[in-house]
Image (spheres, helix red, strand yellow):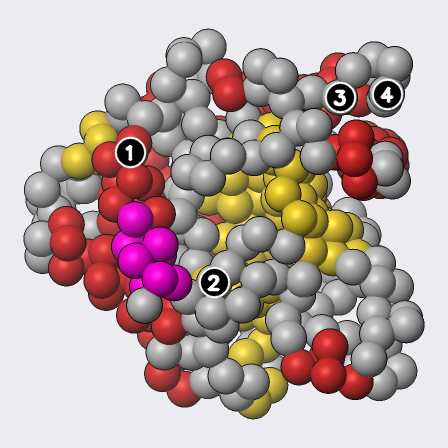
Amino acid sequence: MSNANYALAELNKETTIGGEGTTVERAIPVIDLSDFENRKHEIADALWAASTDIGFFQVYNHGIAQEDIDAAFDNAWEFFELPHEVKAQYPMPKGTNAGWEFKAQVRPSTGTPDNKESYQVTRPLMDGKWPTEAELPGFQERALRFERQNWELGMRILSCFALKMGFAEDFFTKAHDPASDQYQSTLRMIHYMSMENAKPEDFKAWRAGAHSDFDCLTILHQKEGEGGLQVCPGKDAASGQWTDVAPRKGYITCNIGDMLMRWSDDQLQSTLHRVRMPRDGEYMGRRLSLPFFCQANRDALMVGPLGKYEPMTAGDYLTMRINANFAAIKK
């Protein structure tokens, strides 16, 4: 399949499933990462099984302390509670993954902006994007520490996929080298607005419209009681059947992205997901999530184990996907 056709196929996967659909029960695999080095082959088998089927899974005994996750949520809230004019000093330019945006992300599946604001941390792109120490003391240090913790977890999980794909176990670690100026993995802080005083018509929108992620692997932190995440596996994309993935304390939700799906020659499944509006009787307040996107360095060459696709750098791949989305939104 050519690069252009691949981009179109991935885009169609999103745009054909923009409606409400129905909610069904699906088992979301739960995987124990304890005693990782001694159980690595067992863990790799479990991750591979989950990712060739549904493409979503939750991990526990993952090595990031709960107090560190709680502190990261507090750190994010401190940023979002800054005055609008302060946050606006650190905008995210189009085509980049660093800085702050407010209701600016439009999904091809909906054609409307997501009901959220976000702040994105991509290490090499952060010049001029950090709040000052006077505005938010310690914010940068805390954010970078949490970014590193997520990178380490992501590399452990990706080493299992490298093992199953026949690569060296540190293959993806080298491809996501944070010391390189080509590094493009991103920590995102997302604030979905409170719906407590919303009008009935506001509930017709999406907190985040249906999409798949462009990256290799997404690591998602959510707060228990602040639900809304739904998934629809790629193999079921035409069905319009969605499954709620409830946040659980001590568990981190992960999903395969389009980049790793291509890199695996489509053995691993990138999965559509969205964040719906709360329903009657559910929590209506503001919602925060903290995803970390493991995106291979721009100069990393993507060559799959089966030779299905022509070689392509991760930078060119992301540019291709972003351009395809932009073209769809402009139609």
Q: Are marks 3 and 4 in contact (CB under 8 Å)?
A: yes
Helix, strand or loop at label 2? It is: loop
Q: Which residue is label 3 attached to?
A: 131
Disc 4 versus disc 1: nearer the observer: 4
Q: Amino acid at mark 2?
A: Arg
Q: Is residue 268 left or right of residue 101?
A: left
Q: Residue furthest top?
A: 179
Q: Quadrant of the N terminus?
A: bottom left
Q: Whole-percent x and y of residue 112?
A: 54, 68
From what the image shows, is residue 267 above or below residue 109? above
Q: Residue furthest front?
A: 85
Q: Are marks 2 and 3 in contact (CB under 8 Å)?
A: no
Q: Quadrant of residue 105?
A: bottom right
Cα gap from disc 3 to disc 4, whole angstroms:
6 Å
Helix, strand or loop at label 3? It is: loop
Would residue 326 be counted in the magenta stretch? yes
For the magenta stretch, what is the residue range? 323-330
**Residue under the point 59% across and 76% down:** 243
Q: Is residue 60 left or right of residue 125?
A: right
Q: Whole-percent x and y of residue 78?
A: 87, 34
Q: Which residue is label 4 attached to?
A: 135
Q: Is residue 153 left or right of residue 72?
A: left
Q: First in sequence: mark 4 or mark 1?
A: 4
Q: Which residue is label 2 attached to?
A: 107
**Residue under the point 50% across and 83% down:** 19
**Residue under the point 56% across and 35% down:** 92
Q: First in sequence: mark 4 or mark 2?
A: 2
